Image (spheres, helix red, strand yellow):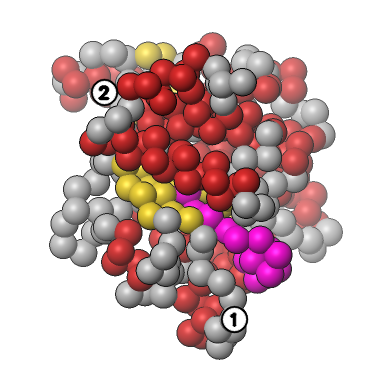
């Protein structure tokens, strides 16, 4: 039985971006009902926007089967998990003077729009937890992907004493419990990526390849896509743009054009939530049909674009898909 949010969307979301949201959600549900799986990409600062409040349940209920995200989203969900009570809201962020921003810096509060992440309680706490795993794997001449190191610190209980939110609201905890396939291109462009580089420079970590990154992620994604698409159609649900979206969607033309695996199916569903306007040369603002010319989507692939704020749209879509 549908819940009140689902009923509200069905009754009120009839036109324009509201209609686009409902149509995309309906096709998402149809894709899963036909036995398809869903691949999700997460850009922007969605973890700091606490997307875990709804995304975690999508993962637990089997509505998301793999994720690509930026390094920032990978770590910021865990930062929030252990330091939520130390975050500072800045509702007047549009009026801040440079001097106000400097005052935040001096308090070690790193601002993301209206939210300040506390360096000590969030970033340094997680650095301390993961450094032990980096060093341990390095000494054994073993390597893991960035998300696998995050799974380790969740599973070993080393940060559990610091939890400041209900772990059911952390999408990374849900992903770790499911051992969800994850791909994190450009991980080095993140706080922990910068910290890892520092530990390699200082000599704490001897082998820079202890943390596996970009090309190896694409190889792993190619293997996952080839195996999964042989039994299920794979949908592509994109929040934002950038590397989180462009990196994984390219796996299909790579398989077709570079490996000559022409029998591998195209993506079976596409939806993007973005406030980027259509413009010249912008991946984030490109209309879905442009992806046909790159061999990513087919003529008949269900295609949706919702031009709005993902922090508003994504939780509503997830609520509708979950029947809340």
Residue 202 seen by the camera: no
x, y percent for residue 284:
30, 53
Q: Quadrant of residue 234?
A: bottom right
Q: In this view, does 286 lie above or below 161?
A: below
Q: Name the residue under label 1.
A: 263
User: In this image, 257 relative to 223: left or right?
Assistant: left
x, y percent for residue 85:
54, 11
The residue nearer to you, when weighing 129 against 5, is 5
Q: State which quarter of the image contains the N terminus.
A: top right
Q: Name the residue under label 2.
A: 101
* Residue in view at x 43 percent, y 62 percent: 301
x, y percent for residue 94:
19, 21
Residue 159 seen by the camera: yes
Q: Nearer the viewer, mark 2 or mark 1?
A: 1
* Residue in view at x 78 percent, y 54 percent: 137
Query: Magenta stretch?
Result: 223-237
* Residue in view at x 48 percent, y 84 percent: 257
* Residue in view at x 46 percent, y 39 percent: 25
User: In this image, 136 relative to 171: left or right?
Assistant: right
Q: In this view, does 39 lie above or below 88?
A: below
What is the residue that sits farthest to the bottom in this orientation? Answer: 260
Q: Within 10 angstroms of label 2, few (less than 14), some, or many (20 or more) residues?
A: some
Q: Is residue 142 above or below residue 148?
A: below
User: In this image, 243 relative to 14: left or right?
Assistant: right
């Amino acid at each position: 039985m549908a819940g009140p949010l689902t009923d509200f969307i069905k009754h009120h979301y009839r036109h324009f971006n509201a209609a686009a949201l409902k149509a995309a959600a309906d096709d998402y549900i149809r894709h899963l009902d036909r036995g398809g799986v869903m691949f999700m990409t997460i850009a922007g600062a969605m973890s700091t926007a606490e997307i875990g409040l709804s995304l975690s349940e999508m993962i637990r209920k089997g509505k998301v089967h793999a994720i690509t995200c930026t390094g920032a989203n990978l770590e910021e969900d865990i930062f929030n998990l252990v330091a939520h009570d130390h975050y500072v809201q800045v509702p007047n962020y549009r009026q801040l003077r440079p001097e106000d921003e400097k005052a935040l810096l001096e308090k070690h509060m790193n601002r993301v729009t209206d939210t300040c992440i506390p360096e000590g309680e969030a970033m340094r706490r997680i650095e301390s937890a993961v450094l032990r795993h980096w060093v341990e794997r390095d000494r054994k001449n073993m390597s893991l992907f960035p998300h696998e190191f995050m799974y380790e610190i969740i599973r070993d209980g080393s940060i559990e004493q610091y939890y400041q939110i209900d772990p059911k609201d952390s999408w990374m905890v849900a992903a770790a419990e499911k051992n969800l396939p994850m791909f994190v291109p450009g991980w080095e462009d993140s706080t922990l990526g910068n910290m890892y580089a520092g530990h390699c420079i200082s000599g704490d970590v001897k082998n820079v390849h202890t943390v596996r990154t970009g090309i190896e992620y694409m190889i792993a994604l190619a293997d996952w896509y080839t195996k999964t698409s042989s039994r299920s159609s794979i949908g592509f649900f994109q929040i934002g743009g950038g590397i989180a979206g462009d990196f994984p969607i390219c796996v299909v033309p790579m398989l077709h054009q570079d490996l000559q695996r022409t029998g591998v199916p195209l993506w079976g569903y596409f939806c993007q939530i973005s406030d980027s306007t259509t413009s010249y040369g912008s991946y984030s603002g490109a209309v879905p049909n442009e992806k046909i010319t790159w061999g990513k989507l087919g003529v008949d692939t269900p295609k949706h674009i919702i031009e709005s704020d993902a922090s508003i749209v994504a939780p509503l879509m997830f609520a509708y898909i979950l029947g809340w």
